Image (cartoon, helix red, strand yellow):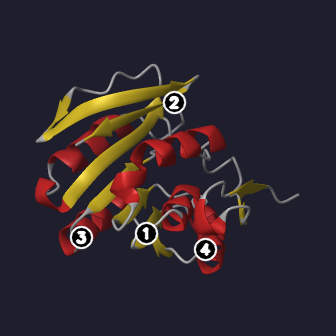
Amino acid sequence: MQLFTTIHQGKFKGKKLLLPPSATTRSTKSIVAESFLNSALLEIRGAVFVECFGGSGLVAASALSVGAKHAYAVELDKTAFGVLAKNASVAGFEALYGDTFTLTPALVAKHTDVVLYLDPPFDIREGFSGIYEKVIHLVENLPKANLKMVVFEHLSSVEMPQNIGQFCKTKTRKFGKTTLSYYV
């Protein structure tokens, strides 16, 4: 049985997107996506939006729905990417197959006014030990001048640093086991 999620705001409100199998990804909960959109709406409008570890692409599709100029979702898992590509054709964002750690620096270097959303697999999953250290290192090396905002979706039990390179944490929002940390 195929599972779906729904875009809750903007011009695509009510549009259903496919969800990849939970064996390969952990989808962003609707309440987390909605809170993010409400908190970052002004930054998203007119920006280039990049969703790393894209899964279904819900956050990229939602960002495009509320006024992002362009949206990308990056996914490495082949099964998840198949679903992501189908959702991209429905919602108009660009699905990129490949490694976030390779593709993201190139995307950020190519654009200005980028809102970056990082939703790595929680490090409790097999094969993802140290994932938070890797994404922190990734962000430390991105050109701050090209980024409007960086947002991490992470386990609430993980305390993200106050500063990552030139970026400073401005707020956090907790949703049970999931937390969003915002950096500018």
Residue 57's quadrant in the figure? bottom right
Q: Which residue is denoted by mark 2 in the rendering?
A: 124
Which class describes the residues within 10 Å of circle 1: few (<14), some (14-19), or many (20+)? Answer: many
What's the distance in space between the residues labelled 3 and 1, CA to CA?
A: 12 Å
Element under disc 3? helix
Q: Label 1 near label 4: C-beta < 8 Å?
A: no
Residue 95 visible in the picture:
yes
Element under disc 1? strand
Q: First in sequence: mark 1 or mark 2?
A: 1
Vertical relation: 3 (above or below) 83: above
What's the distance in space between the residues labelled 4 and 3, CA to CA?
A: 23 Å
* Rendered residue at 45%/73% (across/down): 96
Q: In the rendered structure, which amino acid carries the disc numbered 1? A: Tyr
Q: Which mark is nearer the camera, 3 or 1?
A: 1
Q: Label 3 near label 4: C-beta < 8 Å?
A: no
Which class describes the residues within 10 Å of circle 2: few (<14), some (14-19), or many (20+)? Answer: few
* Rendered residue at 56%/46% (across/down): 33
Q: In the rendered structure, which amino acid carries the disc numbered 2? A: Ile
What's the distance in space between the residues labelled 4 and 2, CA to CA?
A: 31 Å
